[in-house]
Each structure stands twice: as structure tokens, then as C-alpha cells.
Image (tube, rainbow, N blue to C red):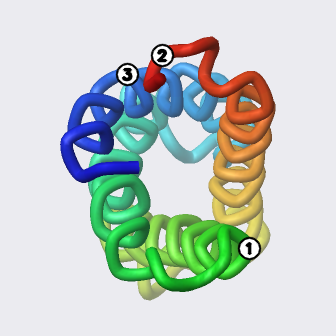
């Protein structure tokens, strides 16, 4: 895919991704987070990682197989989002480690769900969107 197509796809892919991830974060993130924070997390975390996954990694890894790209991208996104979420909303004195692991799990599940949706759409060539 050319850099121009990647840029064209970015806004649509971002909206699709957050439309999948936000409902998962709303139900999956621990109760100590407000609904507003959960929605903000869905929008913000994806805004931080999605451009790298969509614009940067495809170009850096263009000489490698799609499998290598998928592994790198799908490890990068949830790990980075968990770190960012903890830095923004975690508390160093938080004795509720269960809620922290629940939050991390919700972020990983949200990323896996959007990845699965992307793969499903990729099977159908994004319904001719980028042809």
C-alpha cells in the first residue's frame, strides 16, 4: 500500500477502531474509572498508537512479511496503550492490583477485537475502499 493510501485510510480506520474499542473499554475497565475517563481512554490511547500502526510500521516493515508486521503492530499497540493508561490513570500507591490487571486486560481485549475486525475487513479487501 502506498503512503498516500495509508493517509487516506487513517481517519476511517481510526473511527472504526474506536467504535469497536470504546464499548469494550466501557464494560471492561475497572469501576474506579468514570464513563468519561473510559471514553477518553478509547479515543486518546488509539490516537497515540494508531498512526504508528497505520502509517509508520507498514513503511518500516515493508520488506518483511505481513506476519512480521502483524506481530510487531499487535504487540506494540496494547503494550504501549497499557503503559500510557497506567502513566495517566494509575496510582503508584494503588493497592488494588486487581483493578490494574483488569484495566490492562480490557485494553488488550479491545485491541484484539479491533484487530479481528480489521482482519475480517481485509479478507474482503476493505469492501473495495482502497482499490
Residue where numbered disc 2 is placed: 129
Coordinates of residue 48 in the picture (x, y in percent)? 29, 57
Q: Earlier in the sequence, mark 2 or mark 3?
A: 3
Instruction: Report if the CB atoms under discs 2 and 3 are less than 8 Å apart.
Output: yes
Which image quadrant for residue 103? bottom right
Which image quadrant for residue 108? bottom right
The residue closer to the viewer here, 108 or 38, is: 108
Q: CA distance from mark 1 to mark 2?
A: 22 Å
Spot the residue most to the front.
131
Coordinates of residue 117 in the picture (x, y in percent)? 73, 32
Coordinates of residue 116 in the picture (x, y in percent)? 79, 41
Can I make out residue 7 in this image?
yes
Q: Is residue 71 above or below residue 122?
A: below
Instruction: Report if the CB atoms under discs 1 and 2 are less than 8 Å apart.
Output: no
Q: Earlier in the sequence, mark 1 or mark 2?
A: 1
Residue 67, disc: 1
Residue 41 left/right relative to 125 = left
Query: Which is in the foreground here, disc 1 or disc 3?
Result: 1
The residue closer to the viewer here, 22 or 91, is: 22
* Crowding at mark 3 (Cα within 10 Å: few <14, some 14-19, many 20+): few
Residue 98 left/right relative to 93 = right
Q: Earlier in the sequence, mark 1 or mark 3?
A: 3
Can I make out residue 96 in this image?
no
Number of dots carrying numbers: 3
Q: Which residue appears at 65% of the width and 51% of the height?
A: 111
Amino acid at each position: 500500500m502506498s503512503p498516500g493510501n495509508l493517509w487516506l485510510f487513517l481517519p476511517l480506520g481510526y473511527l472504526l477502531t474506536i467504535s469497536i474499542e470504546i464499548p469494550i473499554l466501557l464494560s471492561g475497565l475497572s469501576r474506579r474509572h468514570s464513563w468519561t475517563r473510559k471514553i477518553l481512554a478509547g479515543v486518546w490511547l488509539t490516537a497515540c498508537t494508531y498512526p504508528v500502526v497505520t502509517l509508520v510500521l507498514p513503511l518500516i516493515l515493508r520488506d518483511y512479511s505481513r506476519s512480521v508486521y502483524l506481530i510487531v503492530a499487535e504487540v506494540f499497540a496494547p503494550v504501549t496503550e497499557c503503559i500510557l493508561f497506567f502513566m495517566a490513570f494509575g496510582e503508584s500507591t494503588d493497592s488494588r492490583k486487581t483493578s490494574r490487571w483488569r484495566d490492562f486486560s480490557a485494553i488488550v481485549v479491545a485491541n484484539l477485537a479491533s484487530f479481528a475486525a480489521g482482519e475480517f475487513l481485509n479478507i474482503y479487501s476493505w469492501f473495495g475502499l482502497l482499490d
